[in-house]
Image: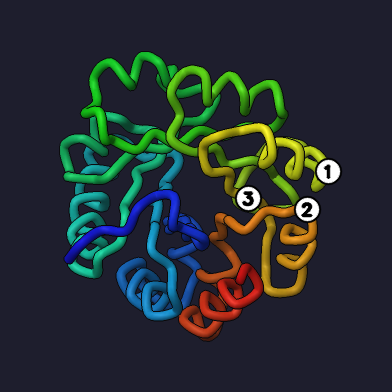
């Protein structure tokens, strides 16, 4: 199916395999349900595993995403992203530098970056990031040391950067309105969808809040 454009993405769902292991649904089930709810971009995140494990997980989920018509991103590993047909990679501050990744990736390859400050967000854009994920905005359990984030700085970053900015970190149906109040209409979520009893409905409600 035809893939969406990055600039059109509003809801970005992280398939965190540690959360999946505790959930009532499989990674594929979550992806399909969230897609029905309107999500059009997914990221595989599995911290602490080798690239062999990550490769086979990414291979399966990349195929599912492309069958659905969604963008698929791999966290941390450029090599796994490139070798599994993913649309891009998300790089943290301790991963391969963005400018280095740009040299070995196709021109249209999506490279996302994490940022916990305006300075870092600007640097990521300068190095060639396709989008920036800023946070953590709220308390989150998916990261051991979440970057400090504020709604005020999120709003500033969204105004300054030319690339899409996604708010990330502890966002759910109750607090998403606080993100929209600073002018941000793009969010990245994990727990809100994965831990939901109805991932499809949750995705739909989050998108409605962003409208």
Crowd rating for badge 1 (residues with CA inside 10 Å; few <14, some 14–19, many 20+): few
In front of the other: 23 or 12: 12
Q: Are the residues flagged by discs 3 and 1 in contact, CB closer than 8 Å?
A: no
Residue in the foreground of this view, choosing between 72 and 162: 162
Q: Position of residue 26 (x, y in %)?
A: 36, 72
- Which residue corresponds to the image point at 65% horizontal and 73% vertical from the top-left? 209
Residue, disc 3:
168
Q: Residue 182 carries which label?
A: 2
Q: In this view, does 197 lie to the left or right of 118?
A: left
- Distance (Cα) linking label 3 and label 1: 14 Å
| Quarter where residue 132 is shown | top right
Residue 82's place in the image compared with 167, above or below, is above
x and y percentages locating residue 57 in the rendered image: 26, 52
Residues at marks 2 and 1, CA–CA distance in whole angstroms:
7 Å
Residue 152: give its label: 1
Q: Can you give x and y, in whole percent of width and height, for residue 123 in the image?
A: 58, 19
Marks 2,1: beta carbons within 8 A:
yes
Nearer to us of marks 2 and 3 is 2
Give the mark, 2 or 3, whose residue is nearer the N terminus: 3
Name the image quarter holding the N terminus: bottom left
**Colour scheme of the picture:** rainbow
Mark 1 element type: helix
Mark 3 vs mark 1, foreground winner is 1
* 166 left or right of 62 in image: right
In this rendering, the answer to whether 30 lies above or below 150 is below
Q: In which quarter of the image is residue 52?
A: top left
Q: Quadrant of residue 189?
A: bottom right
């Amino acid at each position: 199916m035809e893939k969406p454009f990055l600039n059109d993405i509003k809801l970005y769902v992280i398939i965190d395999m540690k959360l999946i292991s505790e959930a009532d649904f499989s990674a594929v089930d979550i992806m399909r349900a969230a897609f029905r709810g309107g999500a059009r971009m997914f990221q595989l995140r599995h911290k602490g595993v080798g690239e062999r494990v990550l490769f086979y997980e990414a291979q399966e989920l990349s195929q599912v995403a492309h069958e659905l018509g969604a963008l698929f991103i791999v966290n941390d590993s450029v090599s796994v992203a490139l070798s599994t047909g993913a649309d891009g990679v998300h790089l943290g501050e301790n991963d391969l530098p963005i400018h280095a990744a740009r040299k070995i990736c196709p021109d249209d390859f999506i490279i996302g970056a994490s940022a916990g400050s305006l300075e870092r967000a600007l640097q990521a854009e300068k190095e060639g990031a396709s989008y920036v994920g800023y946070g953590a905005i709220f308390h989150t359990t998916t990261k051991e040391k979440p970057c400090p984030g504020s709604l005020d700085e999120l709003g500033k970053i969204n105004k300054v950067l030319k690339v899409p900015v996604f708010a990330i970190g502890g966002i759910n149906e109750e607090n998403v309105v606080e993100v929209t109040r600073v002018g941000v209409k793009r969010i990245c979520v994990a727990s809100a969808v994965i831990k939901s009893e109805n991932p499809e409905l949750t995705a739909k409600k989050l998108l409605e809040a962003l409208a």
